[in-house]
């Protein structure tokens, strides 16, 4: 692996910035830029060691292009649209399970406290409140199972 390192004055000379006023502020500015977070060094007499990460910004020729690439890197990828399923699918599946259990064992398996709460389990939770709601509904569903022979379930 080849380690790339550049001297500060060399970088300034190559960019034609050595005579610019306020150039001494550049190291602080560069340290704050996400594109150079993992790099070390500065523009003084120090040696600057860029990391391979900086390659993401090669061929950038304007501030707008830099900001566009930076935004594309920092923003999370777009989430695919959720597949909308019928909330009745889950309720129907639970009903089917209960009927099959009832036919096989002559006793019900599941007492659904609220079909509406059971239907909520079919949807994604996008907030903490929705997650709490779904977990509560799931807990109610588990409480509704009445497995024959389990004396701890008897009320």
Image (cartoon, rainbow, N blue to C red):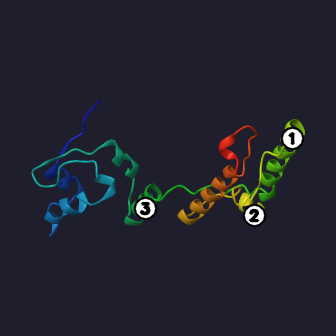
Count residues near mark 1 (Cα–Cα under 10 Å), then give few for <14, some for 14-19, many for 20+: some
Q: Position of residue 86 (x, y in %)?
A: 79, 57
Mark 2 or 1: the one toward you: 1
Marks 2 and 1 sit apart, C-alpha to C-alpha, by 22 Å
Q: Is disc 3 in contact with disc 2, using a CB cutoff of under 8 Å?
A: no
| 90 left or right of 27 in image | right
Q: Earlier in the sequence, mark 3 or mark 1?
A: 3
Identify the element where label 3 is drawn.
helix
Query: Residue at the location (15% across, 51% down)?
Result: 8
Give the image location of residue 114, x and y in percent: 75, 62
Within 10 angstroms of label 2, few (less than 14), some, or many (20 or more) residues? Answer: few
Name the residue that disc number 1 marks: 100
**Alpha-carbon distance for marks 3 and 2?**
50 Å
- Please identify the quadrant where the N terminus is shown: top left
| Residue lying at 30% horizontally and 59% vertically, measured from the top left | 33
Look at mark 3 in the image and give the residue it sits on: 65
- Residue at x 77%, y 58% (from the top left corner): 87
Judge by depth and name the residue closer to the eye, 54 or 83.
83
Secondary structure type for disc 1:
helix
The residue at which mark 2 appears reads as 116
- Nearer to me, 100 or 32: 100
Mark 3 nearby-residue class (10 Å; few <14, some 14–19, many ≥20): few
């Amino acid at each position: 692996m080849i380690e790339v390192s550049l001297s500060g004055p060399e970088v300034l000379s190559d960019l034609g910035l050595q005579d610019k006023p306020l150039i001494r502020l550049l190291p602080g500015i560069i340290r704050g830029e996400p594109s150079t977070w993992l790099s070390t060094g500065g523009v003084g007499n120090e040696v600057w060691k860029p990391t391979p990460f900086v390659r993401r910004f090669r061929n950038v020729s304007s501030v707008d292009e830099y900001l566009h690439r930076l935004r594309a890197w920092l923003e999370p990828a777009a989430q695919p649209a959720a597949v909308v399923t019928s909330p009745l699918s889950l309720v129907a599946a639970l009903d089917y399970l209960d009927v099959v259990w009832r036919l096989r064992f002559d006793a019900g398996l599941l007492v659904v406290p609220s079909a509406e709460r059971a239907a909520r389990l079919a949807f994604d939770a996008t907030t903490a409140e929705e997650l709490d709601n779904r977990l509560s509904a799931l807990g109610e569903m588990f409480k509704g199972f009445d497995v024959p022979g389990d004396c701890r379930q008897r009320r």
